[in-house]
Image (cartoon, rainbow, N blue to C red):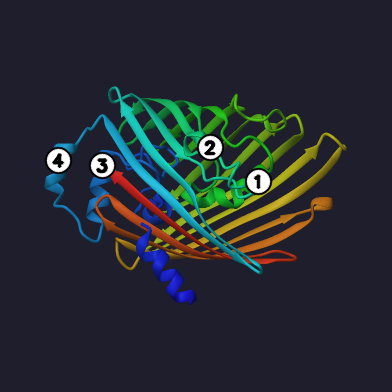
Amino acid sequence: MFLLHFLLVFLFHLSTLSAHPTYIRLGYNSCTACHESSTGGGLLTDYGKGISASQSLYFKDLEEMQGSSQQAYHQAFQSRLMNVVRPGYNRFFPMQADYLASYHWNEKFGVKATLAVAPPNASESSSERSQTYQRIYFRELSAFWDFNKSTTKEDRLSFGSGFLPLGLGIVDHTSFVRSENRLTVTDIPIELTYFQNRKEYLWHTFIYTAHPLETKTNAESGLGGQYFQKWTPKFLVGGQWLLAKSPSIRREMGGFLVKYGVDKWAFLTEIDRTWRYVKQNDYNFGQWALYQQIAFFPKGWLSPSFTWQRLQREGVFDLKEDRFGFNLDWKVYTNLSFNSEIRYRKGQAFHETSYLTQAYLNWW
């Protein structure tokens, strides 16, 4: 039954292959060659579409794609489906559906947007359930300026709303390590980010404030950054930091990151230490978060990977939880890929199995 369930999910629900584990082994240590975003994932550039086509199971002749070079407008669609199973509980639901778009006025200026449809809240009764149009919102809306872009140098300034540019840049990484590191603060901040990429290093720094639609107690503002040293094109070691506060919590975070690729293998590691100060009762507590991924690439269009995530929180908020995952990425066609993952989550007093399926269509 378990195998049948996995195969059904695997076959019928077609997300983007994450740039970092796929291409770090090939020496692509900057994301903007292939992606619209400096942190990877999401919309592909014209060059990225060519690489995507060459690595798909059924691909177009690259000469066919020359007519689409230097497109001003890019768009994509993605969706996620989740099935959560634990003792006495079984829920099957759509996690999200997104429309992604970007528009370039010229080689230097452009805008990006992600329009999302959130799933209905599980606690809502059928009579209270919100309509689809009431759950549409912008997950990202920003403008960017590439004021120094060449084959050896890259500088980008961006402003708008979206997720903070922290972590390894994996599309679904936000589901555990990032979300737990945030812990009841604003989800979609408004930020100003400066990104720089050079032959020996890449880094970015940002400042942010809460989105106007965020609840008052969760309205966080702060500043942070991330730095990677390129020891070789396929071996990057870096760190990240964050200083932030909201009306209820002040937090400080420091982290260590590694990206390494060799032959058909890629290894990613992130370790974060977060300190929090709860203002209401003058209480401090700490937290460790770990993300580890090992990916294998027997073919350009196929990639199995294994992940291990751990969260350990101290004090009265004591929590120790592990999450293991087996993930399979399959790039079916030039612009179509899908991803299926089986996760096992184990806490101090519970265990849970989930099946995540993601579909990604990068429109030519």
Marks 1 and 4 in Cβ contact (< 8 Å)? no
- The residue at the point 39 percent across, 30 percent down is 112
Identify the element where label 3 is drawn.
helix
Residue at the extreme right? 281
The three-letter code of the residue at mark 4 reads: Gln
Q: CA distance from mark 4 to mark 2?
A: 33 Å
Q: Which callout, 4 or 3, points at the residue further toward the start of the chain?
A: 3
Marks 1 and 3 in Cβ contact (< 8 Å)? no
Identify the element where label 4 is drawn.
helix
Q: Is residue 244 left or right of residue 72?
A: right
- To which residue does mark 3 refer? 47
Q: Which callout, 2 or 1, points at the residue further toward the start of the chain?
A: 2
Q: Which mark is residue 181?
A: 1
Identify the element where label 1 is drawn.
helix
The three-letter code of the residue at mark 1 reads: Asn
Label 3 packing within 10 angstroms: few (<14), some (14-19), many (20+): some
- Assign the C terminus to one quadrant of the image: top left
Residue at the extreme front? 127
The three-letter code of the residue at mark 2 reads: Phe
Q: CA distance from mark 1 to mark 3?
A: 34 Å
Q: Which mark is residue 92?
A: none
Q: CA distance from mark 2 to mark 1?
A: 13 Å
Q: Which callout, 3 or 2, points at the residue further toward the start of the chain?
A: 3
Residue at the extreme left? 63
- The residue at the point 32 percent across, 24 percent down is 108
- The residue at the point 40 percent across, 68 percent down is 8
Q: Quadrant of residue 312?
A: bottom right
- To which residue does mark 4 refer? 66
Task: Kindly report which numbered mark, 1 or 3, lies closer to the viewer in this rendering.
Answer: 1
Could you say which is closer to the camera, residue 129 or residue 1? Answer: 129
- To which residue does mark 2 refer? 163
Residue 210 visible in image: yes
